[in-house]
Amino acid sequence: MVIEGTPAARGYHMPAEWERHSRCWMGWPERLDNWRENAVHVQQVFMKVAIAISKFEPVTICASPAQWENARSHLPENIRVIEMSMNDSWLRDTGPTFVVNKKASNPAASEQPVAGIDWNFNSWGGVDDGCYQDWSLDLLVARKILEIEHLPRFPHSMILEGGSIHVDGEGEYLCPV
């Protein structure tokens, strides 16, 4: 469901980095131009990170059709593995920025308590300077995640890697240099 207007105007804000959240989303690495030796070593690292996180909260791994079986075979059953086409595994930059609405905890509120911002993405620089030339699948990642979780979506035309901003949960946005 697409929500019109800005998240702030609808009562949403981005929670602080350190606040509890309900799930961690990760991509399964596979790009051969980005990872050496068929990405085997980085997949082992992602697996260890996912297992560590899963001790504290649910984890979902997004794997391409070609890698779904590989990811599923290396991860414990408590980690959800879904098939999702994408160009790169860095979901912090291509996935949604989750926002919360504390007023929505009121049963009479018309807003849902959690929604997502679907930023535009350009492969960290665009056609001439980007990391890779085709990011068309990455442009759909945030929308797919929000649909899977049945969460409202704020589409945004601004290009922003979600991992490039940090917030304190009090309305202050800290942009690292």
Image (tube, helix red, strand yellow):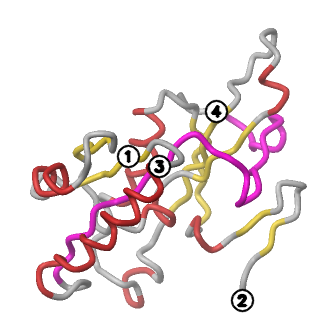
Confirm whether the magenta stretch covers residue 20: yes
Mark toward the viewer: 3 or 2:
3
Query: For the residue marked with disc 4, what is the amino acid?
Result: Ile
10 Å crowding of disc 3: few (<14), some (14-19), many (20+): few
Disc number for residue 177: 2
Q: Residue at x 90, y 55 (%)?
A: 170
**What separation in Å lies between label 1 and label 3 (alpha carbons)?**
13 Å
Which residues are drawn in magenta?
Answer: 4-32
Query: For the residue marked with disc 2, what is the amino acid?
Result: Val
| Relative image position of residue 85 (x, y in whole percent) | 24, 53
Q: Residue at x 78, y 40 (%)?
A: 12
Q: Nearer the viewer, residue 31 or 52?
A: 52
**What separation in Å lies between label 3 and label 2 (alpha carbons)?**
33 Å
Q: Which residue is mark 1?
A: 60
| Relative image position of residue 148 (x, y in whole percent) | 40, 33
Q: Residue at x 30, y 58 (%)?
A: 137
